[in-house]
Image (cartoon, coloured by chain):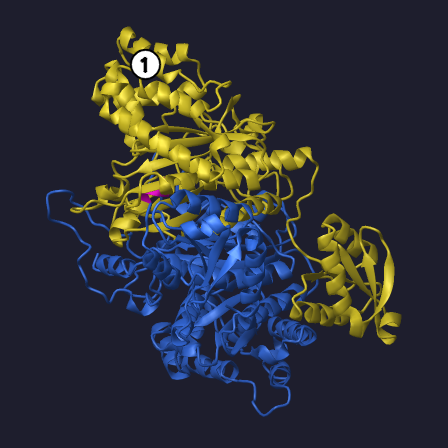
Chain colours: A yellow, B blue
Amino acid sequence: MENDLAQAAIASGGPCLINNGLNCISEATDASTKRQSGDKKKFTLKTPKGTRDYGPTEMAVRQQVLSTVVDCFKRHGAETIDTPVFELRETLTGKYGEEGSKLIYDLEDQGGELLSMRYDLTVPFARYLAMNKISNIKRYQIAKVYRRDNPAMTRGRYREFMQCDLDIAGDYDCMVPDAECLRIVTEILTDLQIGDFEIKVNHRRLLNGILSVCGVNETEFKTVCSSIDKLDKQPWSEVSAELINDKQLCPKVVEAMEAYLCSRAKVNSTSPNSTLIEHLRTDSLLGASVEAQTALKELTLLLSYCDAFGIADRIVFEPSLARGLDYYTGCIYEAVLTGENASEANDEASVGSVAGGGRYDQLVNMFLQKGRGVPCVGLSIGIERIFTVMERKLQREQKRIRSSETDVYVASAQKNLLLERMRLCGELWGRKFKAEMSFKENPKLLQQLQYCEDRCIPLALILGESEIQRGVVKLRVIRTRQEEEVPRNELFKLLSERLQRMTAENL
Amino acid sequence: MENDLAQAAIASGGPCLINNGLNCISEATDASTKRQSGDKKKFTLKTPKGTRDYGPTEMAVRQQVLSTVVDCFKRHGAETIDTPVFELRETLTGKYGEEGSKLIYDLEDQGGELLSMRYDLTVPFARYLAMNKISNIKRYQIAKVYRRDNPAMTRGRYREFMQCDLDIAGDYDCMVPDAECLRIVTEILTDLQIGDFEIKVNHRRLLNGILSVCGVNETEFKTVCSSIDKLDKQPWSEVSAELINDKQLCPKVVEAMEAYLCSRAKVNSTSPNSTLIEHLRTDSLLGASVEAQTALKELTLLLSYCDAFGIADRIVFEPSLARGLDYYTGCIYEAVLTGENASEANDEASVGSVAGGGRYDQLVNMFLQKGRGVPCVGLSIGIERIFTVMERKLQREQKRIRSSETDVYVASAQKNLLLERMRLCGELWGRKFKAEMSFKENPKLLQQLQYCEDRCIPLALILGESEIQRGVVKLRVIRTRQEEEVPRNELFKLLSERLQRMTAENL
């Protein structure tokens, strides 16, 4: 409960602040929104623990980012679907491992089915494919998911947060859709102008092969992988200690693993990824592992496709990349920022990934009684982290984000012109201009112009008795304060031209 | 549980059908998706009762409708906010009357706060205003809400459905924002080209005044209003019988009410709304009701504003309009279709409303310990009903809705051209063309072209060895099957021009 107040305090920042960043969660202690005394009402005015409201400015940033992402998804011919926010509890059971299952929100049994809130978008997607017998689709879905994580433990992680997935389902030729996923990740991170990045790539079966030849028991693959997964945030010494002390692996086994997992592409090699693949391919131990050899062949193919797609320079083959989720069966990948924004995506000083994904060929199968299921490969954009990076970037560049799009404000210079303002507004809306006016009968001119400045509305039309009689209206450019009289019968044409020009000049 | 199968059967219609209309809910009995036998898995492959998936084509229709609505909201300078899908249970308590409260989804008590799923967007909006001390905002919000209604009882009503609200909060001059709400409803229904419609308008305080002078006890206003609310679907005789028999009103009281409630604007009057207002204003009994006289004055003002906004011909003053929700305090309104689409919006043969709203000046106050609260007026677009009307309309007009936006398909006429296709696709995406290619290494040309026809992709680029050697590519117009050779260095310019022209010609 100690974080409830913090959540409320953050959310109460109001609609115009974009500095409600991830870092302040659980730090604030302002209790002003907690109402336990007083005679009128007794309740806590807040959002549920781990959730928050998003005000207009925050929404404007989010929508701008999302539109870049969706544009890319559509550019690749993807369709979208929608699934319910909750699923039958049994649909989610046994899909997220022991840890994940603890974090699922259950609905109360109010008589009827047992339901749970969705934990991700991938399992509902697999359920959708199985239920509708769909054998191929390229679909994206952007929606919120729910995890009863402790927001105090994992800073910046909310219990309600957005996921942004694209998946390609279908029985296709090896690594072709996988390469397109990497291309999509590259396009999105490039289009967002979020700074330099690289995409780490690995293969689950290579990881299995390495563990196997090093002498790790197959039953321990998952738990060992979850330790290896920490290698992007911890040095080998710590991971090694965890494997030996906590997970009871023989030190010799761990030592053998190090040679493979810590091998990295040589920077001064002309073709570092291929060199590393070749190095592993000809390794005496790995040569005996069918798993490893198959994976290395597939990775070689993937790299050649990345080359054809023009994204080879973004790809870094990293044998230690594990990814947390159980269901991956083939290539896996994770994009990280490497430029000046890298530290913005921090989770307590370590750089987090901004996109990830991989192949999962068995998940749909879990929903089928018979048949082969549908092979899938997908990607997930770390959209919440990207929102944070973008908000910080806008703050740093001191760029103002408009939360409304009004182009023309209809003002009056005198009293008793409400009906005149309404008539003009009505005509503007009828011609699809984005227009606004004051809701007061007799607003002061200064206040109306101040509103335009506050809201970055570029143009104002000012009505006055004399102008109305002469059949003109005063057009004011808010930024320059220049005014001119425009005949009413030329007004809409002139407004269109003026707005087009302003858009072209980037306002 | 008897409806679970129906839901599953509906949802299993797959992504390309748009005839999964409201009417088929709970009628289907296909049990093929229920899996209780077999040795592989034992579970029910379905979505929760009263919910469904939306496939790509359904989503395309929904997004098209929503973009028209959002365009209008933005044209009026509205901002958007986002609130969590669940709220503290106490936030929702006592806001929806006895009936509504029964339908709220509760989350299981997993240790911590007691939570419930949002039931509408208005109460969370009021909570947001109170919590963030916002005194004025014009905001829209489009999101799903949750009601544990019985889907078998109320056909076509889902337990998870979308709401689409715009509200204007702030202490403004009388009826000015209210009139803009009516203008927004008019614009949206006009822009959607959904056929003829009218907007019924009334005032809660007029209704109170009428009930009061007829001798209804103030404590019975709400229950009487809920009977009156049925007047759009039932004749007076039935409503009257309910009031006398079920609600124990004196027949004389009910008779007195009839005179007021069944008075309608005369069709052959030049200004029917004003005539009716004048008629009620000068009524001997109503003259004594301050409530009624205040309401009539406000309605007169509202009508003059509607006139200035150019929407007077859409407005029908109807003294019997009651609206179900308790929280309205001022003018109320409801839009209904009157043209050929009216029957499409049917709920069991009665015409339903496609938009509604009104003034609620006391709701925010319920969240405050002190202070006056924020007066609000709002509108809700009946978006789910409109989706249904639009789907039927598209079916009737046999219009195909594309669920993806691909403009150019990159095909190959021979084997071993995968890398070439990838290179060209990569270049197209880099230049922001919407492009796709087959995920097969060596797809058959006929299958590639068939895919273009199936998905309404307008153009294909066909690669062949000979063309590659000569530095050209074959451009095929799918609809006409015309082909021409284009030099690679002129390709992108030509494609842009061709696509622009096709868009201009409406493809």
Task: Tell me: B253 left or right of A240.
Answer: right
Front-most of B161 and A296?
A296
Q: Name the one closer to the observer, A109 or A366.
A: A366
The kind of secondary structure element at disc 1 is helix
Where residue B144 sits in the image (x, y, percent)?
Answer: 43, 54
Give, as a single range, the part of the protein colored magenta.
A120-124
Q: Residue at the far bottom: name it.
A: B268
Tag 1: amino acid:
Met
**In terms of secondary structure, what is the magenta stretch mainly?**
helix
What chain does mark 1 sit on? A
Q: Position of residue A427 (x, y in %)?
A: 70, 71
Classify B232 as above or below B102.
below
The vertical placement of B131 against A497, above or below, is above
In the picture provided, is A56 more to the left or to the right than A228?
A: right
Which residue shows up at 31% across the image and 33% down it? A330
**A121 or B97: nearer the eye?**
A121
Identified at 60% across, 86% down, the residue is: B272
- Whole-percent x and y of residue A348? 51, 22
Left or right, A226 with respect to B286, comes to left
Q: What is the quadrant of the N terminus of chain A in the image?
A: top left
Q: Position of residue A225 (x, y in %)?
A: 32, 22
Residue topped by disc 1 = A257
| Viewer-proximal residue among B283 and A234 | A234
